[in-house]
Image (cartoon, grey):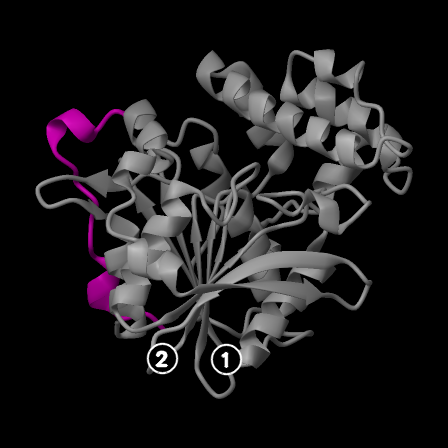
Amino acid sequence: MIAESIENRVFLPRSFLKNRHLQSVMASARVLIGPHRFLLEHARERILETSSGSRLLAYVSSPPASRGLIVILHGWEGSSSSAYVLAAGAYFYRRGFSVSRLNLRDHGESHHLNEGLFHGALLDETCDAVNALALDAGADPVYLMGFSLGANFALRIAVRHSEKPIRGLRQVFAISPPLDPYKTTLAIDGGSGLYRKYFLKKWRRSLKKKQRLFPHTYNFNKMLRCRTCLELTEKMMTYFPEFPSYRDYFNLYTLSEKSFRDLNVPVRIFISEDDPVIPAEDFLPLAGNRFLTVSRQKFGGHCGFIDFFPYCRWYNDRIAEAIGG
């Protein structure tokens, strides 16, 4: 279990940084990555083949003497090069950990690796990729860290761990995870237009890239006119006949209090009450147990938790304390 002293830590940023939208925007601001040159200089590309035949792209940075492996999963339409991923990777690399930045299917520069489209229920291939990275680490302890949708994947991997273990997995950390993707999609569409426009722009760009690579398989031209994320999700079901409806699709990666009852690896969730795209009430039914800890903070926005003077991403310090880093 994570030490009680760590649980009592509170994120209290400077007054001008308490705005939830500012925190959320800063999370992806590349000017706030921090020193990451050595992380990138020592990164090697790794193509991971899964049991289903799909391939995922990762970048692995290993110091001369590693204290363990941190596997990082980015958010929806993010990548291994997202600011929050690089910031976390650089933070732990400087502390002597190997860092694997894994791209989910069709994220980053990986669209060409698979003809099939990404969707949020692709848990098996993500588990396989994380386990392959863990096997590469040998006897080193393994820690999984996810952001937003990547945090949802990390939580599901932790749940699956009791049946399909990840070699050496010691702890899982989830920053701003959506528990109910349907409600999160509604929050994106119904909240500030900033988020809806941001995600639609990146999603459209990704779909256009996929269409250029596989023109005989995909034609998204009409779909790209959709004005909300939910509308585009519904239209995309044409390419996923295995899902009777978009609600059935969302249900496949919805998490509830019951989902965490059989955990056998420590899991720590970081969530802010002012997250503009993750409804805070989704976390109210979650009661901590021997393996689950929910760190509810008043401020932080979506994947933010950033403060200045000195600059920090608060969750990195808390995770380092938890793993003895």
For disc 1, the marked residue is 137
Left or right, 27 with respect to 259, comes to left
Query: For the magenta stretch, what is the residue range?
Result: 1-19
Q: Does residue 156 show up magenta in the picture?
A: no
Depicted 56 relative to depicted 95: above or below: above
On residue 101, which mark appears?
none
Q: Give the image quarter of residue 263.
A: bottom right
Pinpoint residue 262: horizontal percent, then vertical percent.
60, 69
Picture residue at 73% right of the left edge, 45% below the top: 112
* Residue 192 visible: no
Callout 1: helix, strand or loop? loop
Amino acid carrying mark 2 in the image:
Ser
Depicted 230 relative to depicted 159: above or below: above
Amino acid carrying mark 1 in the image:
Ala
Alpha-carbon span between mark 2 and mark 1: 9 Å
For disc 2, the marked residue is 66
Pinpoint residue 188: horizontal percent, then vertical percent.
53, 23
Q: Residue furthest bottom?
A: 139
Q: Quadrant of the C terminus?
A: bottom left
Q: Earlier in the sequence, mark 2 or mark 1?
A: 2
Q: Give the image quarter of residue 209.
A: top right
Disc 2, disc 1: CB below 8 Å?
yes
Q: Give the image quarter of residue 180.
A: top right
Picture residue at 56% right of the left edge, 65% below the top: 158
| Mark 1 burial class by Cα count in 10 Å: few <14, some 14-19, many 20+ | some
| Mark 2 burial class by Cα count in 10 Å: few <14, some 14-19, many 20+ | some
Picture residue at 17% right of the left edge, 40% below the top: 12
